[in-house]
Image (cartoon, rainbow, N blue to C red):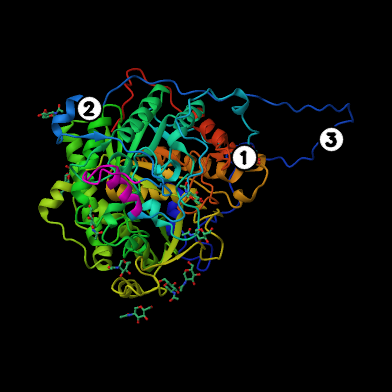
Amino acid sequence: MASWIALLLFGLGAATAQQYYIPVSGISARPQCTATPSYSQPTYSPYSAFAYSMTETVRTATSVQPGPTTTYAPPAASLTSLISSLSFTTWGKWDPNATVSATDTDNPYGDAAWTALWKMANPPNFTETSVFSTTVSPTPIPTSELVLPPSDYFGPTDCYYFPADFQFGVAGSAAQIEGATADEGKAPSLMDILIQDDRPKDYVTNENYYYYKQEIERLASMGVKYYSFSLAWSRILPFALPGTPVNQQGLDHYSDMIDFVLEKGMIPAVTILHFDTPAQFFAANLSAAQAKPVIGYSNGGYQNETFVDAYVNYAKIVMTQYADRVPIWFTFNEPFIYSFNGLSVDHVLKAHAQVYHFYKESINGTGKISLKFNDNFGVPRDPANPNDVYAADHFNSFQLGMFCNPIFLGQDYPDSYKDTVPDYVPLTPEDLSYINGTADFLGIDPYTATVVSPPVANSTDSIHECCGNMSSTYFPYCVNQSTLTTTGWDIGYRSQSYVYITPRYLRLYLSYLYNTFHTPIVITEFGFPVFGEDDQTALSDQLFDMPRSVYYLSYMTEVLKSIWEDGVHVAGAFAWSFADNWEFGDYTAHFGLQTVNRTTQERRYKKSFFDLVDFMNTRTMPQQEGWSGGWNF
Ligand SMILES: *[C@@H]1O[C@H](CO)[C@@H](O)[C@H](O)[C@H]1NC(C)=O
Ligand SMILES: *[C@@H]1O[C@H](CO)[C@@H](O)[C@H](O)[C@H]1NC(C)=O
Ligand SMILES: *[C@@H]1O[C@H](CO)[C@@H](O)[C@H](O)[C@H]1NC(C)=O
Ligand SMILES: *[C@@H]1O[C@H](CO)[C@@H](O)[C@H](O)[C@H]1NC(C)=O
Ligand SMILES: *[C@@H]1O[C@H](CO)[C@@H](O)[C@H](O)[C@H]1NC(C)=O
Ligand SMILES: *[C@@H]1O[C@H](CO)[C@@H](O)[C@H](O)[C@H]1NC(C)=O
Ligand SMILES: *[C@@H]1O[C@H](CO)[C@@H](O)[C@H](O)[C@H]1NC(C)=O
Ligand SMILES: *[C@@H]1O[C@H](CO)[C@@H](O)[C@H](O)[C@H]1NC(C)=O
Ligand SMILES: *[C@@H]1O[C@H](CO)[C@@H](O)[C@H](O)[C@H]1NC(C)=O
Ligand SMILES: *[C@@H]1O[C@H](CO)[C@@H](O)[C@H](O)[C@H]1NC(C)=O
């Protein structure tokens, strides 16, 4: 990592009030220009005949080559003895306007009870105006859609490549794409009740529930190897709790999806819970689902007294069903963001650890398990100022350390967490030894960076005062966050949302994570909603998304430097997302590598998708003799 960091950390002692974030070391080097310039005058040609000499290269994208067929655990039929016996049933589709009521009111899990769940959740302005009502059969992607776009003039010039076991893929989550939210037995989740104002709801989104085969066909045709998606708990267990019946249609849906991913030569990565906690966990007070939590942004219901047992039961069911075919598991998505209080964090840790032990010691799964964490890297406003460095450490350790200290290091929570969340649940030595080592790598969603300093300049006391004061403006992070550097420049190119293009900080961040938590790193989400993309009325303009290409190619170039120059074990990267989707009440922040026409559900590949897969294809190491498709960690 050499010069850039060295300069960042040490090179600025004398140069006060100068730009702290960009090395100022004279005119940029041009290593490609070896000859000493002679500064002679150019020689202009005599006039000649002119011809339109431009050419167009038309290439089509390649499909994924199917890998070796591997299983990662015994099949479901051999694992049933590991869990209590299951009953299976089906329910229909909820119709809030139905004039006939179900009569099976004696059955605690019958149609009447299922309908009552929807009535309890009472999703606002519920309508489902869907294009599809049954699974769409996949059709091959026409060659006309696979023609490469014009390439950008500037681009990466590196000569590095990715190791053969690098996981490159795309990611999405159930509630943000599936739609069909009250179809085929799915019960309501937090996502159906969270957005109470007149913003768009999750009821329809991308209709991926019915369109998934075509969706996967499109990804395979682009040469994407890994597909990361999440399961909707309330689709698999509408009544959420242990001992309640499994929804056969929900279970079959994800089984078919996994099979189709494998049939296309791709590899599935499954997130067990991505924000869409079943609504029952808020049953005592549904409006609490909208309450602002102490810790994160939303109340995920993890603090509910029944949560841990219910989550572990659900996770065991899906693992016994799918672990033979799924090699990568994430127990929780960004648990910080949906943690309500100290009990939530405790529940996430303990539920996660139980599931890890079950997978490794009962199922004997040979795949990998982790969680997906959030933390937009907090970088010190002035890296030469120890108070700003302290603030950055506080910011990063608060968001990551509450989970990562116990999981990766077997260590107690950091002070930044204990000082901020006084109702934290202490971890005993037994807890720590049970939780220690329960992840095979660290999954991180490092979308961007943020500039951090103490709330009052140079005052670390101002951090500590805020930690104990919930009414402080800076609570709970207790630092001043900014998108500006000390000289007033933005930290990077701005998106439609909180994301700025900050590739160099990504590299620094990967070093921070690797050297702090001593584990391989997988970038489980990263992506860029181009500013104003939704306002482009011509589809062709939306498709030509240069800033997103700059984001992905610069980030991946820095990943390569992290691997080869810093020696950081970065084991994979998943782009968020493969298509524009529902960003929690918002369709204008386009994070997609494809557009989605909200009237027809038609998808189109954006330019950045081609640029990203082309970048990866150009740099993928040929498979080594004897490589079995597994990972070297
Ligand atoms: C219920 O009826 C209302 C009024 O006719 C209609 O606007 C709404 O879309 C219907 N809801 C569903 C889910 O069909
Ligand atoms: C329901 O729809 C009405 C009419 O469009 C709108 O005014 C209201 O804000 C909506 N409520 C919610 C919670 O979305
Ligand atoms: C916790 O979840 C259970 C269902 O599992 C529910 O009965 C109970 O009311 C919930 N508690 C709260 C405080 O919402
Ligand atoms: C339900 O939760 C909301 C939000 O936290 C709170 O304001 C309200 O007082 C609660 N209601 C009851 C009956 O506990
Ligand atoms: C997993 O391994 C343990 C210990 O070797 C063994 O007792 C158990 O039966 C295995 N489980 C399965 C599902 O094969
Ligand atoms: C904060 O501390 C730095 C380095 O110790 C110093 O250069 C700077 O002037 C101080 N700023 C304020 C506002 O006190
Ligand atoms: C956590 O587990 C690692 C790996 O097994 C071990 O080296 C370390 O000592 C453990 N830490 C604690 C605090 O038990
Ligand atoms: C807590 O923060 C609020 C808002 O900044 C402030 O008014 C109050 O004085 C602080 N309380 C303490 C004890 O510092
Ligand atoms: C927060 O930090 C930014 C730059 O990093 C600075 O411009 C701003 O004045 C700071 N705010 C406070 C309240 O100190
Ligand atoms: C979506 O499809 C409809 C119907 O084909 C078309 O009229 C509309 O222009 C499309 N929208 C965009 C943004 O391309």
Q: Quadrant of residue 258?
A: top left
Q: Nearer the viewer, residue 356 or 108?
A: 108
Report how far apart the C-alphas of labels 2 and 3 lie in the structure: 75 Å
Q: Residue 76 shows which numbered tag?
A: 2
Residue reaching furthest top? 625
- The amino acid sitting under disc 1 is Leu
Q: Which residue is mark 1?
A: 543
Q: Which label lies toward us, 2 or 1?
A: 2
Q: Which residue is mark 3?
A: 44
Q: Residue 126 at what x, y percent from top left? A: 45, 51
Q: Helix or strand or loop: what does disc 3 sit on?
A: loop
- The amino acid sitting under disc 2 is Ala
Q: Who's the residue at 42% across and 44% down the image? A: 525
Q: Quadrant of the C terminus?
A: top left
**Discs 2, 3 touching: Cβ within 8 Å:** no
Q: Nearer the viewer, residue 288 or 48?
A: 288
> Horizontal placement of 553 versus 237: left or right?
right
Q: Helix or strand or loop: what does disc 1 sit on?
A: helix
> Which residues are the magenta region?
101-119
- Between disc 2 and disc 3, whose residue precedes? 3
> Horizontal placement of 412 versus 36: left or right?
left
Instruction: Determine the quadrant in which ligand 4 lies.
Output: bottom left
Residue 165 appears in the picture as rendered: no
Q: Residue 65 at what x, y percent from top left? A: 44, 20
